[in-house]
Image: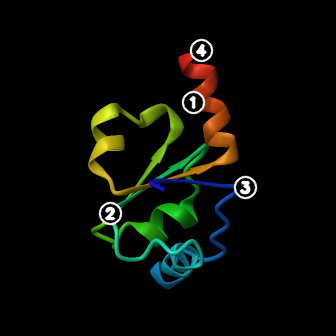
């Protein structure tokens, strides 16, 4: 499917290679990917910023257009909970 939910997104170093490795583990390498996190850490920001097909947003920043524009959407569990609180 288009939606992937993960417990958390652990990026230990601010390296693009670390982020690509995390995407590879979820089989998300050849798609436009939206990653929705509860809090954008410095490591995630720096590791993802050089990837043109990846957009990382905090849960309060998502919008319908962005959700539809991306082929795959990855949510952390905490981000899903924040979105549920925001829209319920």
Mark 1 lies on residue = 83
Marks 4 and 3 sit apart, C-alpha to C-alpha, by 22 Å
Please identify the quarter of the rendering in which residue 81 is found: top right
Marks 4 and 2 sit apart, C-alpha to C-alpha, by 28 Å
28 sits to left or right of 78: left
Q: Earlier in the sequence, mark 4 or mark 3?
A: 3
Q: Residue 32 carries which label?
A: 2
Q: Which of marks 3 and 1 is nearer the N terminus?
A: 3
Marks 2 and 3 sit apart, C-alpha to C-alpha, by 21 Å
Within 10 Å of disc 3 (Cα), the crowding (few <14, some 14-19, many 20+) is few
User: Picture coordinates of residue 28 (x, y %)?
Assistant: 46, 71
Please identify the quarter of the rendering in which residue 85 is found: top right
**Helix, strand or loop at disc 1?**
helix
Marks 2 and 1 sit apart, C-alpha to C-alpha, by 21 Å
Q: Earlier in the sequence, mark 2 or mark 1?
A: 2
Mark 4 lies on residue = 88
Residue furthest to the right: 7
Mark 3 lies on residue = 7
At horizontal 33% and vertical 32% (from top left) the residue drawn is: 64
- Vertical relation: 88 (above or below) 15: above
At horizontal 64% and vertical 61% (from top left) the residue drawn is: 9
**Helix, strand or loop at disc 3?**
loop
- Vertical relation: 42 (above or below) 19: above
- Cβ atoms at labels 2 and 3 below 8 Å apart: no
**Helix, strand or loop at disc 4?**
loop
User: Picture coordinates of residue 16 (x, y %)?
Assistant: 46, 79
At horizontal 55% and vertical 82% (from top left) the residue drawn is: 21
Within 10 Å of disc 1 (Cα), the crowding (few <14, some 14-19, many 20+) is some
At horizontal 41% and vertical 76% (from top left) the residue drawn is: 29
């Amino acid at each position: 499917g288009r939606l992937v939910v993960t417990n958390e997104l652990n990026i230990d170093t601010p390296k693009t290679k670390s982020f690509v490795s995390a995407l590879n583990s979820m089989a998300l390498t050849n798609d436009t990917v939206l990653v929705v996190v509860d809090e954008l850490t410095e490591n995630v920001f720096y590791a993802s910023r050089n990837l043109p097909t990846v957009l990382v947003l905090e849960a309060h920043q998502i919008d319908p257009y962005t959700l539809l524009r991306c082929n795959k959407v990855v949510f952390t569990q905490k981000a899903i909970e924040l979105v549920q609180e925001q829209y319920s």
